[in-house]
Amino acid sequence: MAEMNRFLVQKDREIIESYIERKGLTMKESPAGLWYVIEEEGEGDLLRDNDRIQIAYRCELIDGTFCYSSDESGLMQVTVGKSDIEPGLNEGLRLLKPGGKAMFILPPFLAHGLVGDGKKIPPRTIIVYRVTVIGYE
């Protein structure tokens, strides 16, 4: 089982690296496996657990298939570290400041894992988020 997990993580990594190369992106990888690029720094301190924020976002599969966006469902209300969002998105938000803007690529183990979200995100899927921190309390 452990060997199969390593194989799947490596395959996902290859898909992500190919995507980054095709798109001409310069991204960093966090120790946990989140890929990210900060497009606008924002101002103030980095977001921390328990910070209440609003984000504008767009979520799609790595093949470009649209899933969700704040344009269709409104700004997302998030309490960093506490909200019921993907672990990779929670990690990525901690890299931002109020007003910050970023792109995150979440491998399946930091997204919806083996089950998907039961709606638009299939099982074992890499997802791409574009996020802007709009409101901050």
Image (cartoon, rainbow, N blue to C red):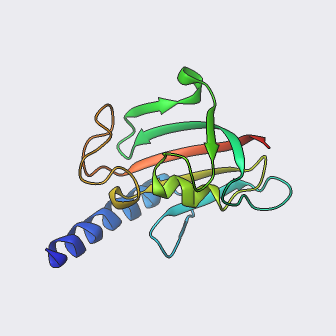
Q: Disc count in the image? A: 0
State whether residue 104 is above or below residue 134: below
Residue 99: x, y in percent?
A: 78, 46
State whether residue 40 is above or below residue 4: above
Q: In which quarter of the image is residue 13?
A: bottom left
Residue in the picture at 80% in, 52% down: 42
Nearer the observer, 16 or 137: 137
Residue 5: x, y in percent?
A: 21, 71
Could you tell whether 26 is left or right of 122 in the image?
A: right
The residue most toward the top is 72
Residue in the picture at 58% in, 37% down: 57
Could you tell whether 111 is left or right of 92 in the image?
A: left
Q: In which quarter of the image is the C terminus?
A: top right
Nearer the observer, 13 or 49: 49
Residue 81: x, y in percent?
A: 58, 56
Residue in the picture at 24% in, 47% down: 115
Q: In which quarter of the image is residue 117?
A: top left
Residue in the picture at 26% in, 41% down: 122
Could you tell whether 43 is left or right of 128 in the image?
A: right
